[in-house]
Image: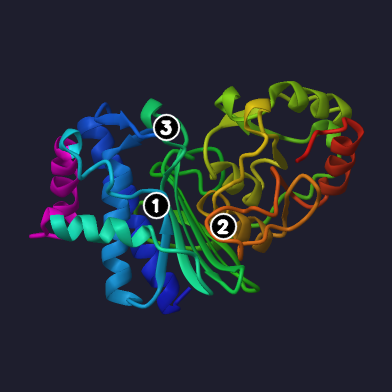
Amino acid sequence: LNSVEIQFALKVVEQAVSLAQHVKKEAAEASFSKKDHSPATVADYAIQAVAGYWLEQYFPKDALVAEESTEALRKPEGQDMLRQVVSHVNRHIPNTTAAQICEWIDRGTKDAKNRYWTLDPVDGTKGYMRGGQYAVALALVEDGKVQIGILGCPNLNGHIAPHQAGGAMLVAKKNEGAWITCLKGSKRFSGVRVSGRSDMTQARIVRSFESSHTDTGQTDAVWKALGIQTEPILMDSQAKHAMVAAGGADLFFHLLPPTQQNYRISVWDQAAGTVIVEEAGGRVTDLEGKPFDFSTGKKLTKNIGVLISNNQLHARALEAMRQTKLKLK
């Protein structure tokens, strides 16, 4: 945990969570729709700017691959949003201009190369806006493999250890393990492990809060094939990865809705959570059982859907998906 890379990542995620909470407190309603109609917040842009700034200080040669660009902010209708972003960034990096902030944000438009950082400033934007689960997700990828992952989950209070107010932060380094600490207060890290549950009927499943994000019909069919008797835990974002990694849940699968069969997951939606689950002893694959290939650019073009488990339940979940004859393209 003392490597320069991890110290950089911790700094970014801690500031990002603080920034997201402050923005939410002051102006959660300050949002508009991007071209793809997904909600965008001041926090998304401000966090990406802060990450771009710190990357410039620590690893100026590294690329940042992230969700936002300043295209909308630079338009006349985006100027009010830009002013809000500048105001919030200046709380953490004083005396910065709109031009500097736009430059830091646009560091995230770089292509994925042999070594890059990938960021989801506010993963689970709808959860963030409604006061539900969301995460700040940051990861380092080298040669197609995730080396470091950090998830800041401000609203996981009581769901997983430590059971203290202030949320949880999970950290993983490839081949070295995964750890958890409180987001607020002294940073005392403790190791995390997935559950040892092998009884599928009693498996604790996390499902997406937003039903539009998945194929609910096929999800229910898989659920029935697995014989699960417990109630699902509904939540947004890679907080679901955190739940499985820390033993608070045992299984999660994401089936693409019928209208999005050609959709492919972005690297920032999986990188941090994947290495954290794997280093905690779990398993992460696509719906065909293939590991994620992070060498394909911004989109995981060689993978379809997501299956996350405590490893004990993985093979049976894959078999249930084969039995239900999922239509995978």
Q: Is residue 90 magenta?
A: yes
| Cβ–Cβ under 8 Å for marks 3 and 2 | no
Residue placed under numbered mark 2 in the picture: 271
- Taking the image as shown, residue 11 lies to the left or right of residue 267, namely left
Q: Is residue 285 magenta?
A: no
Amino acid residing under circle 3 = Ser
Of the numbered discs 1 and 2, the one sitting upstream in the chain is 1
Secondary structure character of the magenta stretch overall: helix
Towards the viewer: 168 or 265: 265
Towards the viewer: 76 or 285: 76
Q: Secondary structure at mark 1?
A: loop
How far apart, in angstroms, are the residues tagged by discs 3 and 1? 27 Å
Residue 65: image x %, image y %? 44, 60
Rendered residue at 39%/52% (across/down)? 183
Residue 29: image x %, image y %? 26, 26
User: In front: mark 1 or mark 2?
Assistant: 2
Q: Quadrant where the C terminus lies?
A: top right
The region drawn magenta spans 79-98
Rendered residue at 83%/50% (across/down)? 312
Residue placed under numbered mark 1 in the picture: 183
Q: Secondary structure at mark 2?
A: helix
How far apart, in angstroms, are the residues tagged by discs 3 and 2? 21 Å
User: In front: mark 3 or mark 1?
Assistant: 3
Of the numbered discs 3 and 2, the one sitting upstream in the chain is 3
How far apart, in angstroms, are the residues tagged by discs 1 and 2? 20 Å
Residue 244: image x %, image y %? 65, 46
Q: Secondary structure at mark 3?
A: loop
**So how many labels did they put on this image?**
3
Residue 209: image x %, image y %? 56, 27
Residue placed under numbered mark 3 in the picture: 38
